[in-house]
Amino acid sequence: MRTNKQRSMEVTMLTEIKDILARSRATLVEDTIGVVSLFTLLFACLHLFGTA
């Protein structure tokens, strides 16, 4: 069983995670676009060199 202290720590951690995601939403979108772009370039290069 969880103690009251453990429950309050879980709530605190979830609140902190939500706050971080809310503050950095624009950065997360930019990072996701960057990752997708890099993988697209990777697969395109692998495909080109694989058929040469």
Image: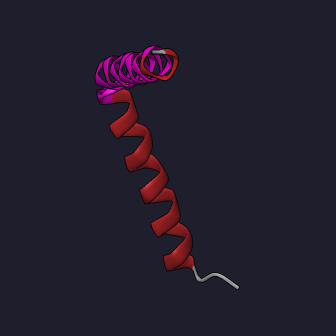
> Where does the image place residue 8, in percent across and percent down from the top left?
49, 67
Residue 20 in the image: above or below residue 43: below
Q: Residue furthest front?
A: 52
Task: Write down the region rendered in magenta.
Answer: 23-48
Determine if the magenta segment contains residue 31. yes
Which of the pair 40/16 is nearer the observer?
Answer: 40
Quadrant of the drawing holding the C terminus:
top left
Residue at point 59% right, 83% down?
Answer: 3
Residue drawn at x 33%, y 20% as measured from the top left: 34
Q: Which x, y percent locates residue 21?
A: 39, 34
Q: Residue at x 43, y 20 (%)?
A: 36
Name the image quarter holding residue 28.
top left
- Give x and y (percent) for residue 32: 40, 23
Instruction: State the residue in front, 37 or 46.
Output: 46
Q: Is residue 34 left or right of residue 13?
A: left
Can you give x and y, in whole percent of width and height, for residue 29 in the image? 38, 18
- Count numbered badges in the picture: 0
**Of the pair 7 and 50, the residue shown nearer to us:** 50
